[in-house]
Image (tube, rainbow, N blue to C red):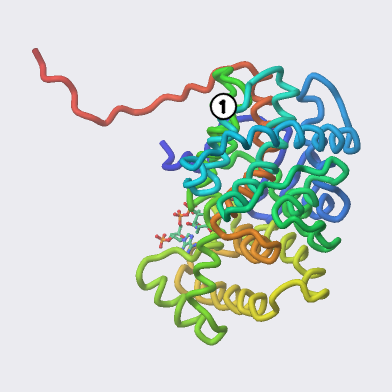
Amino acid sequence: MKNGLEDVIAAETQLSDVDGEAGRLIIRGVSLDHLVADSTYEAVAALLLDGLMERSFGEAQLRDWLAKARTGVFDHIKAADATLLALPPVDAMRALIARLPDGEDFDTALRLLAAPAVFLPAVLRMQRGEKPIAPDASLPQAADILRMLTGKVPTREQTAALDTYLVTISDHGLNASTFASRVIASTQAGLTSSVLAALSALKGPLHGGAPGPVLDMLDAIGTAENAGPWLGEALDRGERLMGFGHRIYRVRDPRADALKGALKPLIASGQVDSARSALAEAVEVAALAILKLRKPDRPLDVNVEFYTALLLETLGFPRRAFTGVFAIGRTVGWLAHAREQALDGRLIRPRSVYIGPLPAAA
Ligand code: CMC
């Protein structure tokens, strides 16, 4: 038995491959750096879903359908009463998604791709006492998310940065939330249930809940000079450094560099708080040095969450909403895996080893 199912092969997939030794992520035959350089979120979503739905489509078609689907789900935010709005944003978003109908797979998939993108900005605005902003079907998903959040059409650099983020996190092998999505799909419970299960798995701090704590760490450190001492004390207390380490990567997480790259145009055009980005850089350098000293047997490097934190903060998302933004991007991966699993048709039903007491002999 392997604790945490480490290294256990639990599915065959054509969707993505995480090479932990080489630090490489491949999505449907294309490496992440190529996707980041050449593809929009809608193009990668079409690539991931290709051949898995009842119909085939490309980037432009999906962009149109998604824009219409955003308008279609906007009405559902009326269900957001005071009890729901008192929840953390990711839980409020999950509660709203739970009320969506589960219908024909293709329409359901479009609704599920659009819903988090509409619900998260709406919930954040309503929690601030502001009116939600309706989707604009002329915009691509990334630009519309930012517009629905702030009420302003985002800059080219902001749109590109969020689009890169959505591409970067679209799929990532058999991570905990994707596995949850596949387990549910194998029971034929429907795509909405798969996405709800995956979202529930995502929000834990060891998976998609880390970037908020990354910012808490940057705040607590405060200055570049304090990085080394602060990190040393955190490790002395037995804490883990948020935004570092990974179950599969033994080298740098390629997604960290994709996001660091996405921040560059924002930095160059003065749209990032330069003191904040300098602090993040100093913390990264100090953390890598101290982890090397303290954990010589375990290669630990920066993971996707570290630069996610800086990027999403720069784009105006409050840190309590970061997991929800992750869900907006990862839903397409969950859906593609759910469909792949459903087409496989076999119920996922592993076994356990019983280590409890035996009944007393009669
Ligand atoms: N800081 C300090 N030490 C660490 C860290 C860290 N971030 N990550 C792992 N270690 C140490 C750990 O203490 C252990 O040391 P020892 O053998 O001396 O006890 C050793 O490395 C191996 O740890 P493990 O628990 O076997 O590693 P894992 O594969 O279960 O951990 C992880 C993966 C992501 C849960 C872990 O690295 C972690 O907790 N990181 C911080 C939280 C974080 O950034 N999460 C986001 C992950 S990336 C998002 C995603 O892809 O889902």
As drawn, the residue found furthest toward the bottom would be 225
- Disc 1 Cβ-to-ligand 1 distance below 8 Å: no
Residue 356, position in %: x, y? Answer: 23, 30
Q: Quadrant of the C terminus?
A: top left
Who's the residue at 57% across and 28% down the image? 99
User: Amino acid under label 1?
Assistant: Ser
Is 230 left, or right, of 123 in this rendering?
left
Q: Please give the count of numbered marks on the rendered protein.
A: 1
Mark 1 = which residue?
A: 193
Task: Tell me: residue 171, above or below residue 236.
Answer: above
Is 109 left, or right, of 29 in this rendering?
left
Residue 83, position in %: x, y? Answer: 46, 41
As drawn, the residue found furthest toward the top would be 362
Who's the residue at 53% across and 35% down the image? 95
Residue 308, position in %: x, y? Answer: 65, 60
Task: Tell me: residue 146, above or below residue 270.
Answer: above
Is 267 left, or right, of 221 in this rendering?
right
- Out of 275 and 336, give the one closest to the viewer: 275
Neighbor class of circle 1 (other Cα within 10 Å; few <14, some 14-19, many 20+) is some
Task: Tell me: residue 316, above or below residue 174.
Answer: below
Question: Is there any visible trace of residue 9 in the rendered image?
Answer: no
Who's the residue at 45% across and 63% down the image? 240
Residue 263, position in %: x, y? Answer: 75, 67
Who's the residue at 41% across and 36% down the image? 1
